[in-house]
């Protein structure tokens, strides 16, 4: 049954309305994502109460969202509010006003719930087993620590990007203001012993993290698309923030990658990330493009299955890709099985030819090999490489995604080199050799399923002095598989600098 799941996230800085659609096959798509920059934290008065103007912003925004939500057949709707309403002394008055003027039922999340949903989003969209997350909202900052994907600690601090801005009076921070801000952050972070010296990646959730990554990517001329799981060193985070500190607000607003509505609060927000990285003694900052809304969706979607997390994030992502581009999963699985036979046989003859980590890449690539054929079969290699390098894939680092794109699109060594011209700094010579081998294996096995009839059941490799034998055991007529394999064995011959003879034997003979 098709589902449409609507989520409203009423944050301190922005209010969002997102709709996810899940079709009968389980293919998940985000079909709507609307944002209003509300800055609700700025409407809190000295007594901690939200003034009428702030409540009006909420009511007008929900009215707009209501008009749009009516065009969908929502099977589930969840509306949540975070720090701005949670901490408001007139919370009940705000909720009463919402109830009187709209049909939305607002659930005010506790500190722990807000932190939990951020953690859930990260562990369901990355392959990072141990980490520390930081989600800087407008009025609160949530930090979690998890091991082996299990939540160990969480905490919500009562400060965020908007409230931290109060430390900086002018466009740019003075040395004194910067020192006071850092002292404030260190004082609060140091109240939690579990933050100190963890030496795990710090994973940033939310607009600050995304903007930080975009700014850095634009500075570098970074060639690979996508923010999710983009990595920066501690030094790169500090350098990016130092660059921003020198720019007055008008110039910051022109910085590529920085949203204009965030230009005035980006410096204290990045400083909060820097301080956490320092205290945790981490050297790696990783951006998560998934946050609270995605955590809420995960809970709603996975609950009927009796789980809270995908067992294997990369595999789930590739399954979603297969559905999205209408791949025949049975045919791709056959290519993956044949690729396993070839890899295992080669490893048996050439010790550690394909290390374990590359074995996973081989399987992933085989399951989406030539996915670009769904766009146009004549340019399936080019479309495959473009698709995989121009969208994030949950559970894969940027390097893994580039390697996957190289393997799944493999056409020839020369084409591979052409594709990598723009990415020459991202892969080492050894990594390029490995992706060439895995790509050649995938293309050879793709040939062995030419008629999509599961003709080839097993592959053996025998190494002789002058040549290598690839022995294919078949059940039905392998004529077309044989023709195609003869054409494509050359890529393996070029890699190994050996002649390869193909032998086809009927099963049980």
Image: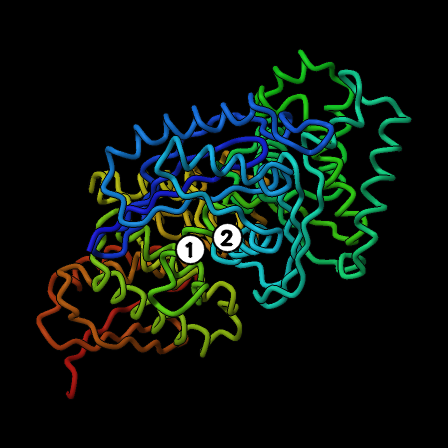
Q: Within the image, what quadrant is residue 443 found in? A: bottom left
Q: Residue furthest right?
A: 176
Residue 372 seen in render: yes
The answer to whether residue 432 is left or right of residue 505 is: right
User: Which of pointers 1 and 2 lies earlier in the amino acid sequence?
Assistant: 2
- In the rendered structure, find residue 298 and report the number of the disc placed on it: 1
Image point (60%, 52%), residue name: 115
Taking the spot 85% from the left edge, 46% from the top edge, the residue there is 187
* Residue 9 locus on image (x, y percent): 47, 40
Residue, disc 2: 121
What element does badge 2 sit on? Answer: helix
Query: At numbered mark 1, what does the secondary structure look like: helix, strand or loop?
Result: helix
Between 176 and 107, the residue placed more toward the observer is: 107
Q: Quadrant of the N terminus?
A: bottom left
Residues at circles 1 and 2 in contact by the CB criterion of under 8 Å: yes
At horizontal 74% and vertical 39% (from top left) the residue drawn is 272
**Is the C terminus in the top left, top right, bottom left or bottom right quadrant?**
bottom left
């Amino acid at each position: 049954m098709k589902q449409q799941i609507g989520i409203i996230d009423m944050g301190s800085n922005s209010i969002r309305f997102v709709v996810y659609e899940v079709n009968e096959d389980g293919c998940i798509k985000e079909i709507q994502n609307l944002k209003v920059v509300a800055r609700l934290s700025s409407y809190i008065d000295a007594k901690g109460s939200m003034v009428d103007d702030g409540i009006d912003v909420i009511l007008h925004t929900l009215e707009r969202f209501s008009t749009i939500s009516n065009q969908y057949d929502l099977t589930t709707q969840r509306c949540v509010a975070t720090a701005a309403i949670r901490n408001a002394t007139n919370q009940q008055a705000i909720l009463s006003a919402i109830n009187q003027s709209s049909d939305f039922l607002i659930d005010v999340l506790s500190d722990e719930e807000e932190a939990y949903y951020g953690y859930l989003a990260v562990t369901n969209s990355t392959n990072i087993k141990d980490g520390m997350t930081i989600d800087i909202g407008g009025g609160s900052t949530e930090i979690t620590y998890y091991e082996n994907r299990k939540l160990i600690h969480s905490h919500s601090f009562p400060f965020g990007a908007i409230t931290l801005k109060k430390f900086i009076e002018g466009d740019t921070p003075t040395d004194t203001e910067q020192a006071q801000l850092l002292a404030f952050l260190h004082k609060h972070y140091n109240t939690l012993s579990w933050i100190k010296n963890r030496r795990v990646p710090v994973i940033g959730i939310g607009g600050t993290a995304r903007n930080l990554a975009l700014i850095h990517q634009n500075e570098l001329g970074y060639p690979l698309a996508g923010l999710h799981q983009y990595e920066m060193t501690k030094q790169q985070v500090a350098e990016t923030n130092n660059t921003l500190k020198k720019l007055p607000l008008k110039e910051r607003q022109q910085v590529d990658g920085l949203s204009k509505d965030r230009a005035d609060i980006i410096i204290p927000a990045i400083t909060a990330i820097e301080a956490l990285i320092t205290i945790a003694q981490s050297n790696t900052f990783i951006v998560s493009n998934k946050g609270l809304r995605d955590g809420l969706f995960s809970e709603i979607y996975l609950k009927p299955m009796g789980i809270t997390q995908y067992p294997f994030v990369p595999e789930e992502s590739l399954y979603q890709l297969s559905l999205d581009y209408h791949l025949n999963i049975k045919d791709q699985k056959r290519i993956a099985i044949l690729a396993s036979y070839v890899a295992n046989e080669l490893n048996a003859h050439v010790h550690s030819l394909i290390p374990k980590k590359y074995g996973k890449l081989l399987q992933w690539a085989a399951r989406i090999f030539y996915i670009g054929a769904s766009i146009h079969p004549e340019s399936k290699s080019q479309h495959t490489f473009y698709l995989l390098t121009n969208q994030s894939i949950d559970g894969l680092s940027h390097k893994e995604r580039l390697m996957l794109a190289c393997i799944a699109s493999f056409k020839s060594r020369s084409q591979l080199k052409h594709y990598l011209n723009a990415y020459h700094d991202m892969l080492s010579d050894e990594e390029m050799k490995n992706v060439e081998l895995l790509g050649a294996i995938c293309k050879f096995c793709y040939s062995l399923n030419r008629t999509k009839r599961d003709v080839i059941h097993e592959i053996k490799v025998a190494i002789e002095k002058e040549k290598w034998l690839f022995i294919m055991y078949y059940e039905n007529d392998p004529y077309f598989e044989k023709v195609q394999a003869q054409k494509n064995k050359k890529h393996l011959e070029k890699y190994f600098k050996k002649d390869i003879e193909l032998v086809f034997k009927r099963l049980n003979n």
